[in-house]
Structure formats: C-alpha cells, structure tokens
Image: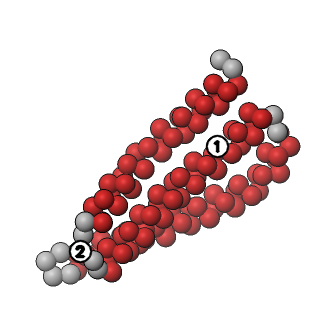
Amino acid sequence: MNTDTNLLMTLLSLVVVQLPVLIAVTAGLVLAVGAPRTAARTGALVGLSLLGASCLLGLALSALPLWLVGRGDFASISSLTQVLGMARFALNLADAFGLVLVVWALTRALRQPGG
C-alpha cells in the first residue's frame, strides 16, 4: 500500500473509533430537540453540542499530524506538539463542561413536576 492509502486507512480508523460517541451525541440532540422548551432542554442542547464539537475537533487534531507526516513535513510536527497538547486540554475542558451541562439538565428535568 502506498502512503496515501495508509493515511486514508488511518483517518478512517480514527473516525470509526469516534463513531459511537458521535451517534450517541446525535441521538441525544434529536431527543433534546423534541423536548419542551425549558432551561433543562437548553442546557442539554448546549452540553451535547459541546460534546459533539469537541469530538469532531479532536478528530481533526488527530488527523493533523498524520497529514503532516503524509506530506513529509516532520519539522512542523515537532513544533506543533505543545500546541496540540494545549488544544487537547481545551477539548477535554469542553468535554467536561458539556457533560456537566447534560447531567445538570437531566437532574433539573427530573426535579420538575411530571419529569
């Protein structure tokens, strides 16, 4: 296999690994959109959107070094290491905040009459 095929297969495997999370976030968004308009619904939508965006941005961050290797730009990879680390930290913060919002929305919805 040539380098382009290897790169494509690696990118495809990255997407497949994240697919369950993307499916769960999409299903959550569909369920939340159909819920009555409340603060809990808004919190759930924002939290799920953060989780989905973080997952997609994480895929892009994982693909960037692979793309640079495919281009043969090894110098850029070493200089990006610290930036990618900080970006991953920011994505983990977004994940944590999104999860807190989803849990907050769930607990708030359960406290409401008829919830």
In this figure, which residue is indicated by the disc labeled 2? 36
**Residue at point 64%, 43% (across, down):** 63
Spatial separation of the CA atoms under disc 2 and disc 1: 38 Å
Task: Identify which residue, 106 or 69, lies in the foreground.
Answer: 69
In this orientation, does residue 110 appear?
A: yes
Left or right side of 10 for 75? right
**Display colour scheme:** secondary structure
Please state which amino acid type lies under the numbered disc 2.
Pro
In this figure, which residue is indicated by the disc labeled 1? 63
Q: Quadrant of residue 108?
A: bottom left
**Residue at point 23%, 74% (across, down):** 36
SS at badge 2? loop
Q: Residue furthest top?
A: 1
In the rendered image, the quadrant that contains the N terminus is top right
Q: Position of residue 44 (x, y in %)?
A: 36, 70
Q: Position of residue 101 (x, y in %)?
A: 41, 72
SS at badge 1? helix
Q: Residue furthest left?
A: 114
**Residue at point 30%, 59% (across, down):** 30
